[in-house]
Image: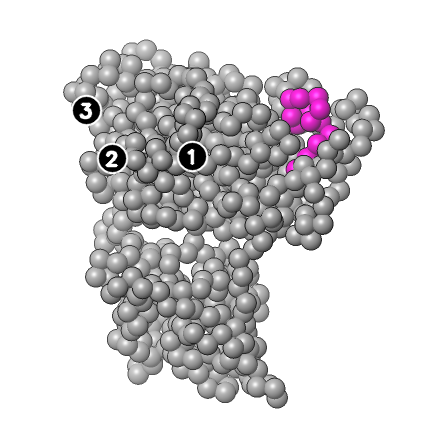
Amino acid sequence: MKSETQPIASKFGTLLGVASGDVPVYSSHYPSADDNELPNRHAYRSYVDGIFMGYKWQCVELARRWLYINKGYIFDDVAMAYEIFHLQSVRVIADNSRLPLKSFRNGSLRHPEPGALLIWSEGGEFEVTGHVAVITEVTPTCLRLIEQNVTHSVWQEGQQYSREIPARITADGSYWLRCSYGDATILGWVVQTEDDTYAEVIEPPKPELFDLQLRQLADKGQTSRAWLNMANPDEEAYVAMMGSHKLGSRAEDQHRYFVQSETAQRELKRATNELHALFMHATDYVLQDDALLEKFNIPVALWPKIHQSWDNRRNQMITGRFDFSVSGRGIKVYEYNCDSASCYMEAGLVQEKWANHFGCNEGESSGEGLLEHLIEAWKASDAAVGDNRDAKRVLHIMQDGDLEETYHALYMQKAIEQAGIPCKVIHGVKGLAWDAEGNVIDADGVQIRWVWKTWAWETALDQIRAECDDDAERLRTYKTDQVRIAAPRLVDVLLREGVMVYEPLWTLIPSNKAILPVLWMLFPNHPYLLNSSFDLTEELKTGGYVTKPIAGRCGFNISLYDADTGLLEETQGRFSAQDQIYQELWKLPEIVGYNGQVCTFSVAGHFGGSCLRVDPTLVITKDSDLIALRVVEDDALLKTSTQVP
């Protein structure tokens, strides 16, 4: 709870005051934002001299803008404000040179100074993101700062700061700040200086902390007993799909699990948060350039609807899945499945039940808390409010007859209902009909207005392509809101005016592999990204490359080429006719016969947990197994090695 009362908030964008260096500070009271002044999401992006500062009017945006105007440099993009504490340099805009940053813990003998950044950790008042402010004045008893996205009241006349924080210098000369919010924690301050006296030592983690290790449990007859609760619909459906109570498909894997260090999990959290922000940045970039959007092979008739979906100020995305290679070589992302992803139930429920039954007490489940994250995301969604005048308000989960999609849908239904949203599952489209007003209704006559789907958006697009015989003119002029004589199809539901779909239509962009070359163009040599291109470049040929269909799924139609030996491996599938992109070859790490891919889940744009997919081949497909992943302390990983008979 806040320890200070909050004055009445000023409207979003109101000038609160002007800080030192002639830098304006604005209200970020989002509920009062005017849709006429800010008609779309792009309008919330803040630029100075063509340089992206951040999103209006958040704390990071002000910090970057103040540094640029007063110092001529900015810090790199961060997903969370608390990550600024671990940055080690800033970029001078004039010549792209780098200047060192040093971080000092609250209570340091190196006192804060005007122009330094004050950083809060995640949690409490600054849950998930942390917070950053710019220090403007330092005295022995208090520190004054400017900030955005905390209070939204206009400063008093003559005031040049947002608020002040009590300070104390102890007998040994340490400078301590007391946070105004009892449930928040000040990490310390970040100073642009070469002097590292008293600074935090920020060293890169040991590479071996990123290597997965395989473990073996003793066989005590665990496989002879049931361990999933058949009274729960999602667990019953999972057992039906797997054929028995098991996590992986192979008998020899039933007593095996992998371990990952806490450092690796922490870095994956950072990577997930940062990459989500980068993919969103790239999505906005694509939607400002029709020539780029054309490369995504989306029917032109849908472009206005995609723009409309993206322009919604609220993200509306519940969850997605990143696919990573994680090893001592580094963390690299292959792609972002944020349209229709899988493995949530295995990560958030099954692997923990496996651990309890088989007696695996080492570390914690990598999917710990995933269900709770999903529940909170649904509580924050528009579907949690809907139209309160509608007594029959319900969210429909739409899936086909696939057994995997059944337990996936039932697991998500549990999260949706625990968020207080009425929910029902529809298998296929049989029983759907049109009402007198041209709306789609289910078999019970309930209008479909809110949808979460396991189908990929590309499935609906394929229905349009088939109807138009892939004729360019017909695809350009296709009408999505027509009432047909025949029963509604999937596309008639998902593209219906007034139907809110999760994940939203704009997720077609970041889920499409065509986003990967765009990311590499925008963020070349980013440590989490792989070199990707629309064309096969000499650089890719020299180092080896992978071809991927831009709208492929499930590991289908992927080919891996080594620079020396040529084709290494390829998969077949139904996406051979799709356009392709080329991505740098970065093999999955091999651990005792397994090739392991770590998947992380973004929930409402933030890290929600992880899991591990394994396969004897170099490509993870829909048939690849999931083996339990446990997160252990760093020392526990370093002291032991892979242990299998």
Q: Please, what secondary structure does the residue beneath circle 1 have?
A: loop
Question: Mark 2 near mark 3, Cβ–Cβ under 8 Å?
Answer: no
Q: CA separation, marks 1 and 3? A: 36 Å
Answer with mark 2 or mark 3, whichever residue precedes in sequence.
Answer: 2
Q: Which residue is mark 1?
A: 585
In depth, the one of 340 and 586 nearer the eye is 586
Q: Quadrant of the N terminus?
A: bottom right
The mark closer to the camera, 1 or 3, is 1
Residue 614 image offset from top left, x and y in percent: 58, 30
Say which residue appears at 62% left-offset and 41% top-offset.
Answer: 212
Q: Which residue is mark 2?
A: 293
Q: Please, what secondary structure does the residue beneath circle 2 have?
A: helix
Q: Which residue is mark 3?
A: 476
Q: Amino acid at mark 3?
A: Arg
Say which residue appears at 51% left-offset and 39% top-offset.
Answer: 325
Q: What's drawn in magenta, residue-wise?
A: 245-258
Residue 405 image offset from top left, x and y in percent: 52, 23
> In the rendered image of this protein, does residue 448 appear above or below residue 428?
below
Near mark 1 (Cα within 10 A), the count class, few <14, some 14-19 or many ≥20, is many
Q: CA separation, marks 2 and 3? A: 14 Å
Residue 42 image offset from top left, x and y in percent: 27, 49
Residue 345 on the magenta span: no
Say which residue appears at 20% left-offset and 16% top-offset.
Answer: 471
The mark closer to the camera, 2 or 1, is 1
> In the rendered image of this protein, does residue 534 appear above or below residue 283?
above
In the orientation shown, which residue stands out farthest toward the right? 220
In the orientation shown, which residue stands out farthest toward the top? 486
Near mark 3 (Cα within 10 A), the count class, few <14, some 14-19 or many ≥20, is some
Q: Amino acid at mark 1?
A: Leu
Q: Which mark is residue 51?
A: none
Say which residue appears at 60% left-offset and 48% top-offset.
Answer: 208
